[in-house]
Image: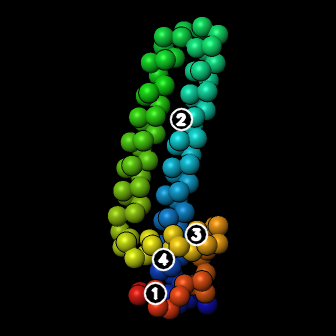
Amino acid sequence: NMDTYRWQHNNAVVTRLYYAERTVQVTFGFAAIFTAFDSFFIYKNYFANDARRRIPKYWAFASIYSALALFVLLKPLTSHEIRVQWNKRKTMGKWLWSVYHIDEAEDEI
C-alpha cells in the first residue's frame, strides 16, 4: 500500500539514493565524453595545448559538482537508511521502492 508512512519514507530514501547515483554517472560520463573529444584533438594536434589544459578542468568540475550534489542529497539520510537500501541494491541489482525487501530486524523507521 503506497499510502502508508513506511512506504512513503522508503520512497523518499530510495529516490534520493537513485538520484545520487545518477548524478555521479552523468557528471563523470560527460567528463569522459569531453575528455575523449579533447583526446581526439590532441591526437590530431588541433589546439593540443588547449585540449590538454581543459581535461583536468572537466574532471575537477565533475568531482566538485558530484560532491556537492551528494552532500545535498545524502545529508538528510541516516547511515542506517543508506545501509539498508545499499544492501537491497547490491542484492537485487537495482533500486527497489517496495518495502517487502526490507527485513523487519533491519527496519528501524
Residue type at mark 2 is Ala
Identity of the residue drawn at 42% across and 36% down: 61
Marks 4/2: CA distance? 31 Å
Q: Secondary structure at mark 2?
A: helix
Residue pointed to by mark 3: 89
Residue pointed to by mark 2: 31
Marks 2/3: CA distance? 25 Å
Residue type at mark 4 is Val
Q: Secondary structure at mark 4?
A: helix
Image coords of residue 38 (percent x, y):
57, 21
Identity of the residue drawn at 58% across and 14% down: 42
Image coords of residue 81 (percent x, y):
43, 76
Residue pointed to by mark 4: 84
Q: Mark 1 or mark 4, which is nearer the start of the sequence? A: 4
Marks 4/1: CA distance? 8 Å
Say above or below: 102 vs 71: below
Q: Tell me where residue 43 sits by quadrant.
A: top right
Marks 1/3: CA distance? 15 Å
Image coords of residue 93 (percent x, y):
65, 67
Residue pointed to by mark 1: 107
Residue type at mark 1 is Asp
Residue density around tag 1, few if under 14, some if 14–19, many if 20 or more, within 10 Å:
few
Q: Mark 3 or mark 2, which is nearer the start of the sequence? A: 2
Marks 1/2: CA distance? 38 Å
Residue 59 appears in the picture as rendered: yes
Q: Secondary structure at mark 1?
A: loop
Marks 4/3: CA distance? 9 Å
Residue density around tag 3, few if under 14, some if 14–19, many if 20 or more, within 10 Å:
some
